[in-house]
Image (tube, grey):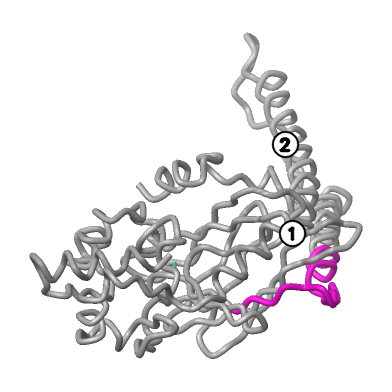
Amino acid sequence: MGNQLMAAATGGAPTPSMFAPVSTPAFAIRELSFLVFAITTLIFIVVAGVTVYAIIRYRRGPGDDGSEPPQVYGSTQIELAWTVVPFLIVIVLFLTTTRYIFAIEERPPTPNAVEVAIVGNQWWWEIRYPRLGIVTANELHVPVSDPASPTPTVITLQSADVIHSFWIPQLAGKTDVVPGKTNRTWIDPLTPGTYVGQCAEFCGLQHAGMLLVVTVHPKDEFARWVAEQQSLAAEVPGARAGRDLFGSLACINCHTVRGTPANGVFGPDLTHLMSRMTLGAGMARNTPENLRAWVQDPASLKPGALMPAMKVSGDQLDQLVAYLVTLR
Ligand code: CUA
């Protein structure tokens, strides 16, 4: 469901393909996979060809007396050949892969780089922009990187609980997200658009419910997004009842709404909740109806979600949802 929803939400390709890269690390990975694919195809053709030849050429003939053919033992030449040739192939693959890994890892950060700190959680992604003062979740927004004046995005990855893996096939390779460790990756998307990613390391019940969407904006559009996200939460007079209710419930222990007393950090920042396309890291489209179902019982949309059912109903639930939808 998640992937279809993402495809619908993003209007993009249903399956993100590593063969359609738009960012330097992903281009490098595709290049390397073509090389590996060429070498392994060649090996396959040789092995399959020799096998088929042997099957046909040496099949039992009409005058075959059933005796054993000549056996070859201890041929240094043959043994050397089938040891040295595979060894050389492995060396070539190893050295090329290493060269690509270093080329991706050792790229010096550009002064214009956008810095993002992402924290993997069971089962959602916290996304922080420390220099911009923005906190959001599950949907990463970055500027397009024009090769003439590159604005790559440098990402540090940390985990709040178990091992996750950050993977957006069209932008970069997988990077493990390990508790107690800070890993780094970077992307420099050359084409605006929406790219879908997914946690790529089994991390529990909702491993498959940990989607990521990266929206690559033209530069002015990104600046607008930043300005919107930097603003404090909207204060709509009509939503006062819901806001007071929100502040009186356990919601504020886990969620932050900037500009209000809510400053919890266990769950996603809700300051601009409605600017996000989906709920529960891609589990449902972010509509008032789904939001209502989510607040009433998150497990109805995402079994295992760590947010408890809020045990509110009727008018109170209406008020809460009426408030949440003002957080644009
Ligand atoms: Cu997080 Cu799988």
Q: Residue furthest top?
A: 62
| Residue at the image point whose x is 17% and y is 75% from the top | 310
Quadrant placement of the C terminus? bottom left
Q: Which of the 4 image quarters holds residue 208?
A: bottom left
Q: Name the residue beneath numbered marker 2.
A: 47
**Disc 2 and disc 1 in contact, CB within 8 angstroms:** no
Camera-nearest label, 2 or 1: 1
Residue 202: percent from the left, percent from the top?
Answer: 43, 67
The picture places residue 67, in percent across and down from the top left corner, at 63, 27
79 or 154, nearer to the observer: 154
Amino acid, disc 1:
Lys
Number of numbered discs on residues: 2
Classify mark 1: residues with Cα within 10 Å, few (<14), some (14-19) or many (20+).
some
Q: Is residue 41 left or right of residue 119?
A: right
> Residue 12's spot in the image, x, y percent?
55, 41
Q: Can residue 5 be found in the magenta stretch?
A: no
Give whichever of discs 2 and 1 has the lower sequence position.
Answer: 2
Q: Residue at x 83, y 56 (%)?
A: 146
Instruction: Find the magenta span and give its range.
Output: 98-117
- Say what secondary structure mark 1 lies in: helix
Q: Nearer the viewer, residue 125 or 82?
A: 125
Residue 103 included in the magenta stretch of the image: yes
Quadrant of the picture in which ligand 1 is shown: bottom left
Q: Is mark 2 within 8 Å of ligand 1?
A: no
Per the image, label 2 sits on a secondary structure element best described as helix
The residue at the point 50 percent across, 59 percent down is 198
Q: Residue at x 64, y 79 (%)?
A: 132
What distance separates the C-alpha of mark 2 from that of mark 1? 52 Å
Binning the other alpha carbons within 10 Å of mark 2 as few (below 14), some (14 to 19) or many (20 upward) gives few
Q: Which mark is residue 60?
A: none
- Residue position for label 1: 219
* Amino acid at dot 2: Val
